[in-house]
Image (cartoon, rainbow, N blue to C red):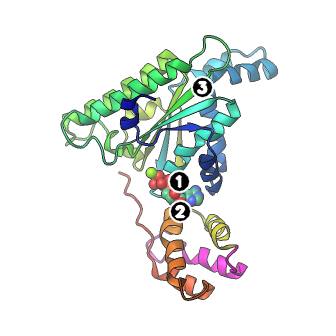
């Protein structure tokens, strides 16, 4: 990793990695997404695995390979805040790396706090990110057989970039950012280097149609169901002396309320409610189920991100 790269991508990591694996395993209610995403990234980064599978099981159907591989290496993760998009995007590479038995470099770029300064900064940022992802992946491309490694470029908080080009008030510069993104995707696709791009956004509807059209897959994330909230409480409070009935009561108390029609997000549960419950009890004595329930009832869920 060059010095330049280290500054562009703040937390680039090499996978597999134990920490990533544990974070991935902690995610609740995403099993189908994990499988879909791992397989998609696996074949995009390392098509030889799919080639072998086809030869083994559908030897006469080579055209199926093209159907899968002739897609731009882009997957969009979209949906409500605090629903696990970033968490999944940052950790899925661990599973892909282990599944494909290759090393994967994750290059995470968050657009939330960046590229909003000088004119041209966003475009420059996106262009360099793709440039470096391409260069890194080109080193791992192999002329025959399995790739020696792969690259996942994560463009997080992409709302800043990928607004619809049709939006009236959109500044000319923003279009340049979107165009740089599209150029980057197309270049990686045509070069057939072992790289894939994950884009996370809270606002699918604001995404440029040209970006959306390129996505090989779009995964939709939403707030936890009652059962999933119960899973969260079991996972975190199951060992803390809670009765089953108390955990159920908590999962019900954090569901849809009155006319608001929305309940707690995953991050409301893990990053707001659970710490509040713990810190309320500390240091005087143990956490009590009835008190935890009171705290849950007094807390308001984060309003949904307006999409549109
Ligand atoms: N499916 C989930 N299962 C368990 N915890 C989750 C899940 N989704 C989100 N969280 C919790 O919320 C935090 C924020 O999630 P994040 O992935 O950053 O959300 P976003 O969708 O906004 O990118 C995570 O670190 C985790 O603690
Ligand atoms: Mg996020």
Secondary structure mostly seen in magenta is loop
Residue drawn at point x = 61 percent, y = 30 percent = 103
Tell whether position 45 is magenta: no
- Count the labels in the image: 3
Q: Give the numbered dot on residue 84.
A: 1
Residue bearing the label numbered 3: 149
Secondary element under disc 2, as helix, strand or loop, is helix
Tell me the residue at 61%/55% (across/down).
27
Is residue 254 within the magenta segment?
yes
Name the residue tied to disc 2: 266
Q: In the rendered view, would you say 123 is above or below 297?
A: above
Q: Position of residue 268 (x, y in %)?
A: 49, 67
Instruction: State left or right for residue 268 relative to residue 161.
Output: right
Cα–Cα gap, marks 1 and 3 = 26 Å
Please report the bounds of the magenta region as a residue range.
Answer: 239-263
**Crowd around label 3: few <14 · some 14–19 · many ≥20 (10 Å):** many
Mark 2 or mark 3, which is nearer the start of the sequence? Answer: 3
Residue 307 % position (x, y): 38, 53
Q: Measuring from the top left, give residue 222's x and y in whole percent.
A: 52, 56
Instruction: Report how far apart the C-alphas of labels 3 and 2 lie in the structure.
Output: 33 Å
Mark 1 C-beta closer than 8 Å to ligand 1: yes
Look at discs 1 and 3 and give the one toward the viewer.
3
- Callout 1 crowding tier (Cα within 10 Å): few <14, some 14–19, many ≥20: many
* Some atom of ligand 1 lies within 8 Å of the CB belonging to the residue at label 2: yes
Kindly check if marks 1 and 2 are in contact, taking CB atoms under 8 A apart as contact. Answer: yes
Looking at the rendered image, the disc whose residue lies closer to the viewer, 3 or 2, is: 3
Question: Where's residue 192, x and y in %?
Answer: 53, 17
């Amino acid at each position: 990793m060059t010095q330049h790269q280290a500054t562009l991508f703040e937390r680039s990591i090499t996978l597999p990695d134990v920490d990533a694996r544990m974070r991935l395993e902690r995610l609740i209610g995403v099993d189908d997404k994990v499988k879909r995403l791992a397989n998609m990234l696996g074949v995009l980064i390392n098509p030889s695995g799919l080639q072998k599978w086809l030869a083994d099981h559908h030897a006469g159907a080579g055209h199926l390979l093209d159907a899968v591989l002739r897609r731009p290496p882009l997957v969009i993760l979209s949906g409500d805040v605090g629903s696990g998009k970033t968490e999944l995007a940052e950790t899925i590479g661990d599973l892909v790396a282990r599944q494909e038995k290759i090393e994967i470099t994750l290059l995470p770029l968050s657009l939330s706090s960046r590229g909003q300064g000088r004119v041209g900064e966003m475009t420059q940022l996106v262009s360099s990110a793709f440039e470096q992802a391409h260069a890194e992946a080109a080193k791992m491309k192999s002329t025959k057989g399995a790739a020696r490694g792969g690259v996942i470029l994560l463009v997080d908080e992409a709302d800043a970039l990928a607004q619809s080009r049709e939006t009236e008030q959109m500044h000319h510069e923003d279009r340049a950012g979107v165009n740089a993104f599209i150029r980057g995707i197309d270049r990686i696709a045509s070069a057939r280097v072992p790289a894939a791009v994950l884009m996370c956004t809270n606002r699918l509807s604001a995404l440029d149609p040209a970006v959306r059209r390129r996505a090989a897959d779009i995964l939709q994330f939403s707030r936890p169901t009652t059962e999933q909230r119960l899973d969260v409480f079991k996972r975190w409070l199951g060992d803390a002396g809670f009765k089953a009935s108390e955990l159920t009561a908590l999962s019900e108390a954090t569901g849809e309320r009155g006319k608001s029609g929305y309940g707690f997000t995953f991050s409301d549960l893990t990053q707001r409610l659970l710490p509040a419950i713990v810190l309320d009890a500390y240091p005087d004595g143990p956490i009590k189920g009835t008190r935890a329930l009171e705290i849950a009832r007094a807390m308001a869920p984060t309003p949904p991100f307006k999409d549109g």
